[in-house]
Image (cartoon, helix red, strand yellow):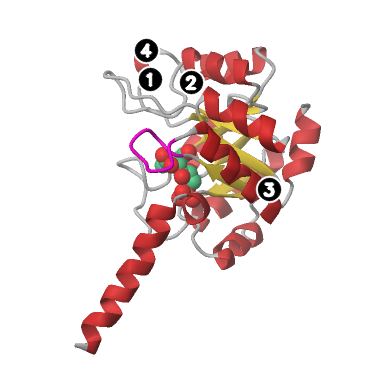
Amino acid sequence: MSGHSFFDAIKHGLIVSCQALPDEPLHSSYIMARMAVAAKEGGACAIRSNSGADVRSIREATGLPVIGLVKRDYPDSEIYITATRREVDELIEAGADMIALDATLRPRPNGEKLSDLIAYVKSRGALVMADISTLDEAVEAAMLGADCVSTTLSGYTPYSPKLEGPDLGLVRDAVRELSPRGVPVIAEGRIWDPADAARALEAGAYAVVVGSAISRPQLITRRYAEAVKNASVKLV
Ligand SMILES: CC(=O)N[C@H](C=O)[C@@H](O)[C@H](O)[C@H](O)COP(=O)(O)O
């Protein structure tokens, strides 16, 4: 899929992240593919997913554009979202249209460089979504040729703010800095309420990624269970 048609497909749209890691109850490529079909039925314009196996089944089941990533831990780095070429190769073979990778400036495994990884993804014909946690990282990723940036990692690096909801301030700042360069900013992370998704677009986001609030039933259930528990305490 060309960059133009990919960005046309996601413009002002809802991207649903369908991910379940091995320690999560829904871990299964079959289940993630059905989750993605449900997301498509509900109006998702694209899917974000983890691992070559899930990318492949989701593409087959939905025909939607897929943003792939591979979460893998390395002993010599804190980076776990598509950290090296090995993960990129897995996603290219699975047919990912766009590859999401950690674009923070922390040291990468095997001493690999962010600039080389971005260039490598592009040389293999895929688009790059740079997962960032600060404005500096967003600007750097855009300079290195990322096709878009996503606020995925705000709140998940030691030096970014720990907010309860989405980091719309970062969305706004990144849009201000990157729109002159023509690099779209995607809002992602802790969007639990449809009103927050709308606010993200109002803040200038090109598209919105929602994950747990749609595809992690154990976390959705916990929010309800806590609300019920808090209400029941007051009733005693
Ligand atoms: C920090 C990190 O590892 N985020 C991951 C990135 O792919 C996923 O676990 C999130 O579900 C995704 O970013 C969507 O965010 P939320 O689930 O909050 O809507």
Label number found at residue 188 = none
Find disc 4 in the rendering and name its residue.
111
Q: In this view, does 155 lie to the left or right of 32?
A: left
Q: In this view, does 43 lie above or below 55?
A: below
Q: How far apart are marks 2 and 1 (CA)?
A: 8 Å
Quarter assignment of residue 141:
top right
Q: Does the residue labelled 4 lie within 8 Å of ligand 1?
A: no
As measured in the structure, the alpha-carbon distance from the residue carrying label 4 to the one carrying label 3 is: 39 Å
Image location of residue 142, percent across then percent down: 60, 32
Q: Which of the 4 image quarters holds residue 73?
A: top left
Residue 5, image x and y in percent? 80, 34
In front: 228, or 167? 228
The tag earlier along the polypeptide, 3 or 1, is: 3
Cα distance between the residues tagged 4 and 2: 10 Å
Q: Quadrant of the N terminus?
A: top right
Q: Identify residue type, mark 3.
A: Lys
Residue 218 in view, yes or no? yes
Q: For the view shown, which residue lies furthest in the bottom direction?
A: 235
Relative placement, left or right, of 62 versus 144 is right
Look at mark 3 in the image and give the residue it sits on. Answer: 40
Pointer 1 with pointer 4, Cβ within 8 A: yes
Residue under pointer 2: 114
Q: Which residue has dot 1 on it?
A: 108
CA gap between label 3 and label 1 equals: 34 Å
Crowd tier of the residue under label 1, counting other residues whose Cα lies within 10 Å: few below 14, some 14–19, many 20 or above: many
Contact (Cβ within 8 Å) of mark 2 with mark 1: yes
User: Does label 2 point to a residue whose CB lies under 8 Å from ligand 1?
Assistant: no
Q: Do the residues labelled 3 and 1 touch (CB within 8 Å)?
A: no
Instruction: Read off the magenta span.
Output: 20-27
For the C terminus, give its image quadrant.
Answer: bottom left
